[in-house]
Image (tube, rainbow, N blue to C red):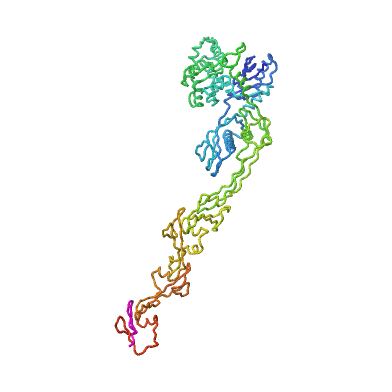
Amino acid sequence: MEERIFALDIGTRSVTGILLAKTNETYSVIDYCIKEHSKRSMLDGQIHDIPEVSRVIRDVKKELEAKHGALNRVCVAAAGRSLITVQGSASIPLNQEPITDDEIIKHLELSAVQDAQRNLVSDKHSRFYCAGYSVLQYKLDEQPIGSLIEQIGDEATVEIIATFLPKVVIESLLAALDRADLAMEALTLEPIAAIHVLIPESMRRLNVALVDIGAGTSDIAITDRGTIAAYGMVPLAGDEITEAVSDHYLLDFPTAEKTKREIVNNGQTTVYDILGMETTITYDQLTQDIGERIEHLAGAIAEEIVKLNNKAPKAAMLIGGGSLSPGIANALAKKLQLPTNRVAVRGMDAIQNLQKTDMLPAGPDFITPIGIAIAAKKQPIHYVTVSVNNKIIRMFEMRELTVGDCLVQAGIDIKKMYGKPGMAAIVTFNGKNITLPGEFGSAPVIYLNGETTSVDQVIETGDQITIQKGRDGQSAQITLEQLIDDAPPLIIYFNGKKETVKPIVRVNGNKKPLDYVVQDKDVIDLQQPQTVQDVIELSEDVPAEIAANSAPFTITVNKRTIALDKAQPTVYVNGKRADLTTMLKQNDELNIIPARQPTVADLLEQLKQSFYDRIHVTFNGKPVTIKQKKLTIQKNGREVTEDAVLEDRDVLTLEEHRTSTFIFQDVFRYVDLDLTDVKGNFRLYKNGQPTTFYETIANGDNLELKWM
């Protein structure tokens, strides 16, 4: 069954209407009509005077309707040069917590699209349709990375490039059609229309430039790697060449335009300049006379192509009325440093599936209007209406639209829809301030027609979208065990028994269990077992007598602090004598012998002092030790002897006396004499010599008492 398609190419100089018949996959031209604008109502593809453009559209419509009946719906195209490409970026803090959900990354990308939209908007009244975006790169802590999933760092960033179409382009087009009593059946982009009929998808992997040289502008589209890679525009085209003809031959602009066309179509023409002089101009003569302007136009087009493509393409196709300008193809090939057969003007014969009929116009002028008719039906940009939080949003489906696109178009800031992060806690840990982050706020919840969905869910016209703010995160909730999870215990063999000595944690000076939840401004001290002393302090299985006597035992003697060695336990590590400061390793063997309670005598021994002055003698063949006190010792203000027990932190004073010499009679205080059967007199001897009771004696003397 035959289908009729009505399309309009609304250009800078004229409006072209075309009627196509479609039978299966074959198209044929039924009729066409061209009407020029009577004034400059369009500029660079944008409608500036809606009523005037609408009047020309109505004239085209009426002429075709007079022959073929009523026309109510039409396929149109927006100028590709209206597309604007902008970069944007967005970041979120990670606080060393990994991203585990693709949805969070999608939200981050949409935030970057909104950033691009903000970068694009020059004032608050500007509005744009997002035609699509691509991720340029992800970053973790400002370093490029392939994927953010499960990555740990401080900050995640995404950089995107987004393409926008100003709403004014579409809305002015809709307004002009409405005034002409036409409804938009389908929309496409002019470069897409031309490429659709000239470069099928199978050829789009080739790097080709398509240049539509119109009257006021030359539109450029680049294909590469299976897609339309870039759009561009040069504000120079056929009018530039017409002005050159006008200047060189002294013709007014309309006459110059007519002269240019006649020479291109017929090879030569005869004109009269403003002075009435007759001149016959040939094609070759025209090419030579306006060669400088041709070179200028070709240079501008080539420069824009290289800018868009970063290099010269493999080939270039020229369409549009301006592509018939004498020598333009060869000049462009030269500028792009391509062989001349790689730059060609394409005519109607290049359109596949188009029947050749008597109504088929010649040349490249009608490629775009025919492309609009075919592409708008095959690859239309549909007008979609959805509701976002009860607000009606209208979009053009330039690609498959998603929930995320609707949120962007509705102006919803994704970042603000996330729950707020919980309050952080700042604590002091082993003398250093550290920040414990609060819980992340949860992602917003999105509903599509009442059911939960994600931002990449494809939407249809009439869909109802609701987005609810995510839950706020909880304040920092971390236990001591979570805080010190990398602090390993010390495993040793203590007095033959395996012992696991865990670290001890004090919070604000008090020992706390590991399930204690850390609070803001807590001062936390972690003590890990490293030495013998640590094991005694931290182990729960150390005998009380060892624990009690393991701390440093100090006393003050005559205002001098002394650590008493005899008060310390005896320590062996792996069978070797050690002390309380000895460092331990995993699986060491530790043996500790408890210390006894120290006395004043232990202190005097350490000080290398004695409580008494002593001498050793013999009396009547038996050894005798004679002593006299030479120290006065006070402990905590009370006098004591050398047998007195000492306590940690006792305060002692030692006062030394001057002692007298020992005499013979002193020995009688240390010996027992049996005087029961004594008769007669006695004599005293020192070292075999007679002596008296008052004779001085010394260490080692031999003393005797003999009865006579």
Q: Front-most of 180 and 227? A: 227
Tell which residue pokes out farthest to the bottom in this image: 680
Q: Which x, y percent locates residue 679?
A: 36, 89
Tell whether 38 sits left or right of 336: right
Tell which residue pokes out farthest to the right in this image: 70
Q: In this view, does 152 lie above or below 64?
A: below
Tell whether 511 sits left or right of 55: left
Q: Which x, y percent locates residue 125?
A: 62, 33
Residue at the location (56% across, 47% down)?
A: 437
Q: Main secondary structure of the magenta part?
A: loop
**Residue 208 falls inside the magenta stretch:** no
Q: In this view, does 26 lie above or below 605?
A: above
Q: Can residue 608 be seen in this view?
A: yes
Q: Front-most of 344 and 493? A: 493
Tell whether 669 sits left or right of 419: left
Q: Front-most of 454 and 392? A: 454
Q: Give the range drawn in magenta.
A: 693-708
Tell which residue pokes out farthest to the left in this image: 689
Tell which residue pokes out farthest to the front in this image: 677
Q: Front-most of 604 and 199? A: 604
